[in-house]
Image (spheres, coloured by chain):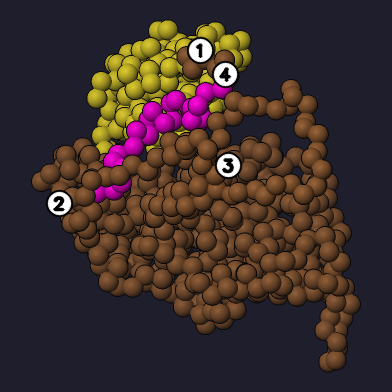
Amino acid sequence: MVNALEATSPKVVEPTVFDLSSPGRVGVQMPAPDVPAMEAPPSHLLRSELPLPELAEADVVRHYTRLSSFNYSVDGGFYPLGSCTMKYNPKINEDVCRLPGFLFTHPLQPIETAQGNLALMYQLQEWLKEIAGFAGVTLQPAAGAQGEFTGILMMRAYHKSRGDDKRVKMLIPDAAHGTNPASVGMMGMTVVTIPSDSRGNVDLNALEAACDDTVVGMMLTNPNTLGMFDENVEKVISLVHGCGGLMYGDGANLNALLGIVRPGDVGFDVMHFNLHKTFAVPHGGGGPGSGPVGAAEHLLDFLPDPLVGIVEEGDDETPPLYGFITPAKTIGRMKTFHGHFGGGLVRAFAYIAMQGPDGLKDIAQYAVLNANYLQAKLRDTYKIPYDRICMHEFVAEGRFEGSDVRALDISKRLMDYNFHPPTNYFPLIVPEALMIEPTETENKDTLDAFADAMIKIAEEAKTAPEVVKSAPHTTRFGRMDEVKAARELVLCCWLPEGYDLS
Amino acid sequence: MNAPSTFKYAKSDEWFDPTTGKIGITDYAQNQLSDVVFVEILVEAGQEIAAGTPIASVESVKASSEIYAPAGGKIIAVNQDLMDKPETINADPFGAAWMIQLEGAAEGDVMDAAAYEKHCEERSH
């Protein structure tokens, strides 16, 4: 709810460090050198005109502490950003990833001295295999999109290894994340868009028509970005397999399936996980992500190099020796060193260990329950174009008959009620889309408060549309000029000498 | 709706003017996209294209869209000015915001203005 004090207090704009700078202020007093002075670098390499700010330590700390308090985060409130799975990230994961043994290892130190880290990675590979039903897992990819790229490289390598050279087309549903066609484009393959049917499933007729011997495979997100579990997923997979294609699973929405459905069992050949979504790795600031890839038996040989494996079996007395192994027909290395170890892998490991199998199943069930609860509460106020039992998220239309209030206005107004907006204008197949994913970590009070705010905003759209269209009113800054920001791509706070803006 | 009656329209909201051979996107499309901030025309003059070929990529603050040719033929002109002034699409979608011009064009799967307006009406609610 809107805080009355906030609404009436003057808005203070935080100056930049350059505005705060005053000549001669210093943060650190350097002692006089007790070693001979080095010769200065040649003068043509020195720049005297660099506008470095001059500030005391307290100025710097206060400036950045104030800035950090302007953020909206999952630690501060409800964050129903659809397809991003902005669940609360348990703080024990932070403790675990800061344990000195994890924190102070170097990726190049001898494996004998990093056995704990390797054991963790090995166990995480094993758990992800079990959770999603795959025969092998790589932990290397930096995030979901690189996971996609890895998976497609493996699919291509698989076809080529069989002398099957004419496969160039990737089938992608129109509800897919934009990264899917982007990853395919990076591979120089052709994207064939497959429409959705009226129930939000892949249109089987269109799919059948597109299946031929030039198909690399299909990239399917299931549940899809409408929050719908594809009712014909087995038929979809058999059509793709029938023409010799492979099935890629975009694991962005795996949260809905944990402990319920294993994509590998359904027939997916390769899939990426988003540890920063499903497995509670924080990602509010755009990273760090972590996008491990699971592979079925027939793709094992193509996994990136190296994988973590047992290089010497242990016994009752001695633990096994963990090390690195190279898959026989590997696509090669996808990332320097071993993926986002501390940032992603250790936190995800801690999360899975804390949940256990029953806890993981609870996650999926509560995530689905919460989304359906919100959908039921909003159904009479907002049009739900694909209105059936949803999975972890659902998509509403942010528009009303006879009103020019749009999804963007509703989202901005939600900020006045202290909620993070849902995902806007995605998927593209729903006009004025508001994609709402509450996740399992929210209680009924929070869901009720959010639904009340959404219903209130729908009323305001009728009674006071200007209030909605000019929102937000209570935030530190009002409505941003997104068009100007996109059209005038000037990111510098000062222009380099000789740069002509026109 | 103000779709010119002499133009032909694709389901995916592109127009084709049989008189001049020009191709662009409709008023309905620009309205759905909202403020256009970037246009890239992906084809060049002299190229032969088939109906359904992606000819441009249009980005607004809401979305990024591929634009497909509603007709095929030989490209005789490309509107370079549009890439410098993407906002023209919002201001004059059926006129100054043409994207490419074809010669000897063969129409793809298109409809007339009345059918297109009905198609837009159906999607409006």
Residue A456 got which mark? none
Question: CA–CA distance between discs 1 and 4?
Answer: 29 Å
Looking at the rendered structure, the kind of residue marked 1 is Gln
**Residue at left offset 25%, top offset 65%:** A449
Looking at the rendered structure, the kind of residue marked 3 is Pro
Provide the chain ID for the residue under circle 4: A
| Residue A337, visible in the rendered structure | yes
Q: Going from the N terminus, do you reach mark 3 or mark 4 first?
A: 3
Q: Going from the N terminus, do you reach mark 2 or mark 3 first?
A: 3
Classed neighbour count for the residue bearing mark 4: other residues with Cα under 10 Å, few (<14), some (14–19), many (≥20): few
Which segment did they paint magenta? Answer: A474-496
| Colour given to chain B in the rendered image | yellow
Q: Are marks 1 and 2 in contact (CB under 8 Å)?
A: no
The residue pinned by badge 3 equals A181
Provide the chain ID for the residue under circle 1: B
The residue pinned by badge 4 equals A497
**For discs 2 and 3, the disc positioned in front in the rendered view:** 2
Relative depth, front residue between A152 and A408: A408
